[in-house]
Amino acid sequence: MSIQETLKLDDQICFALYVCSKEVMKQYRPILEEIGLTYTQYITMLALWEKENVTVKELGAKLYLDSGTLTPLLKKLEAAGLISRVRDQQDERNVVITLTSAGRDLEQQAQSIPCRLFEQSEVSVEELQSLHTQLHRMLGKLKGEQSQT
Amino acid sequence: MSIQETLKLDDQICFALYVCSKEVMKQYRPILEEIGLTYTQYITMLALWEKENVTVKELGAKLYLDSGTLTPLLKKLEAAGLISRVRDQQDERNVVITLTSAGRDLEQQAQSIPCRLFEQSEVSVEELQSLHTQLHRMLGKLKGEQSQT
DNA sequence: AGAAATTATATTGCATACAATTTAATTGTG
DNA sequence: CACAATTAAATTGTATGCAATATAATTTCT
């Protein structure tokens, strides 16, 4: 009776998460289009601006994506001139991702994006903060279970 | 300095939402596989168990999906014998979705799914409730903006 | 009534996601 | 050292998602 004991769509937290995530991505789309990135390409660049010279594996761990998704995506970013993909001479199994100068320059243009999104969101800082905290907590639980299995 | 004023990946609420949604869907996958549904097919069936005899348009509004996604998905559910897609005699533009008896029977097998997910989630009812409320509130804001535009 | 505008699906094209398999390189072991 | 096991990417196949376009049916408007 409390929670999760019915099949009603709007009672499903999974559905709220799914829709909320998609709607937020929809807000990003026109803004990211200005700098020529899709949403997934954007979070990939965020990860690389934070730390480059990473392998596909490391990048995938941070982004929760596997090589099946990343390989073609990284090839597109490479074709766009934002990154380079080079086999590690030390261990040829690894492909190391580096930013090009164009990729590094793009960070400046992206600086304003979080603020722009926040401003158009009508949501208070407290509410976002609280949501953020809860999502991270839940994520921790989800990851914990998996390693348990 | 407070929130959303940096490009750090883990500071982005959009990323927390995106990852959390994917991880939750990952939890569902093996359970839904038992009844032969993907996650999107599952939420589509949830919507239909609640109210059938709906058009693709109405279903799309409830699920936040357009005909480009729904048409092929509904054809698969039809091929699986769970639903029927029939042109409305009154208005041939509409396609009305109805459950077959197999589709209706499947609801029984799905009854336990929310509970099973909750039990393996390690998250408290209060936490889920709170997250759910906040997601709905944010969703309301996001939808509000769109109609404004 | 008949053309124009609108509406509901379907289709096409592009970009993810992810499981499963393949390939190539490296490591561990007898 | 040779071979099995492991590991990292890439590839293949299936299923979304969504923008843009196409198609067909209905409505509106003159």
Image (spheres, coloured by chain):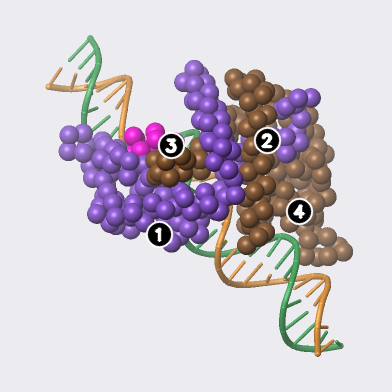
Chain colours: A purple, B brown, C green, D orange
Kindly indicate whether the residues beneath marks 4 and 3 are on one polypeptide chain.
yes
Label total for image: 4
Kindly indicate whether the residues beneath marks 1 and 2 are on one polypeptide chain.
no
Q: Earlier in the sequence, mark 4 or mark 3?
A: 3
Identity, as a three-letter code, of the amino acid under mark 3: Asp
Circle 1 marks a residue in which chain? A
Task: List the single residue furthest toward the front.
Answer: B1
Q: Main secondary structure of the magenta part?
A: helix
Closer to the observer: label 1 or label 4? 1
Q: Residue at x 71, y 52 (%)?
A: B61
Dot 1 alpha-carbon crowd within 10 angstroms: few under 14, some 14 to 19, many 20 or more: few
Kindly indicate whether the residues beneath marks 1 and 4 are on one polypeptide chain.
no
Q: On the image, which quarter does residue B107 sit in? A: top right
Q: Residue at x 56, y 30 (%)?
A: A134
Please give the residue where the numbered disc 1 appears in the rendered image.
A35
Closer to the observer: label 4 or label 3? 3
Provide residue B33's location: percent of width, then percent of height: 62, 32
Q: On the image, which quarter does residue D5 sit in? A: top left
| Disc sitting over residue B27 in the figure | none
The span picked out in magenta is A56-68
